[in-house]
Image (cartoon, grey):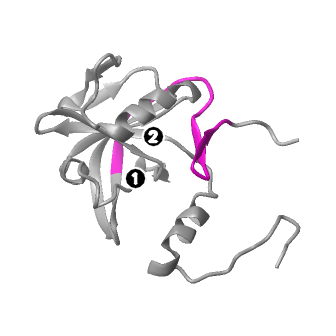
Amino acid sequence: MADGGGLMTDFVPGPDTARLFRNTLGQFATGVTVVTAPGPDGPMAIVANSFASVSLDPALVLWSPAKSSRRFPVFAEARRFAIHVLREAQKDVCERFAKEGGNFDGLDWSLGTGDVPLIEGTLARFECGQFAAHDAGDHVIIVGRVTAARLGTGAPLLFSAGQYGRFTEAG
């Protein structure tokens, strides 16, 4: 069945269609964030595209780490964390922390309130205290109360359909 936009595939999400479901979710373009928190052996980071605003008053945001991640315990237990929105030129930062969560070598960063690692030069940054955590299947939804924010300028690093991209105006 076509709707003018191409072939459509209907399916019921489940174990036999997990890859198809993941590909379908990948059609939603997202920005790329790196979440940081203090870990038992030093600063820790994880890449997340599950970031969203929740409330302006109070200032709340959310993100959702996977329970299967080796880094999950650090972030699930963190009382303070920072969410960094990456700029277009920071694909290398994303790839660094996708592979190794403790690799801050050579990166411009400092420690903020509660020893939270703060990465410099990002498009935006939200310093948060954990406000709530909700079980959500194979993830946990972590809601953070924003205690400080920083706004930069530039273009965001985007991710869609398994690839990095950039924003261009529609014609």
Identify the residue position indicated by label 2 in the image.
33
Identify the residue position indicated by label 1 in the image.
63
Q: Secondary structure at mark 2?
A: strand
Membership of 132 in magenta stretch: no
Q: Foreground: 169 or 147?
A: 169
Residue 35 point in image, percent of width and height: 35, 40
What span is colored magenta in the figure?
A: 144-166
**First along the sequence among labels 1 and 2:** 2
Which numbered dot is residue 155? Answer: none
**Residue lying at 62% horizontally and 81% vertically, measured from the top left:** 11
Task: Determine contact: label 1, label 2, CB under 8 Å.
Answer: yes
Instruction: Determine whether, in the image, residue 10 is placed left or right of residue 34.
Output: right
Residue 45 point in image, percent of width and height: 30, 38
Location of residue 65 with respect to 156 vertically, above or below: below
Residue 119 point in image, percent of width and height: 36, 25
Residue 105 point in image, percent of width and height: 28, 20
Q: Foreground: 145 or 46?
A: 46
**What amino acid is labelled 2 in the image?**
Thr
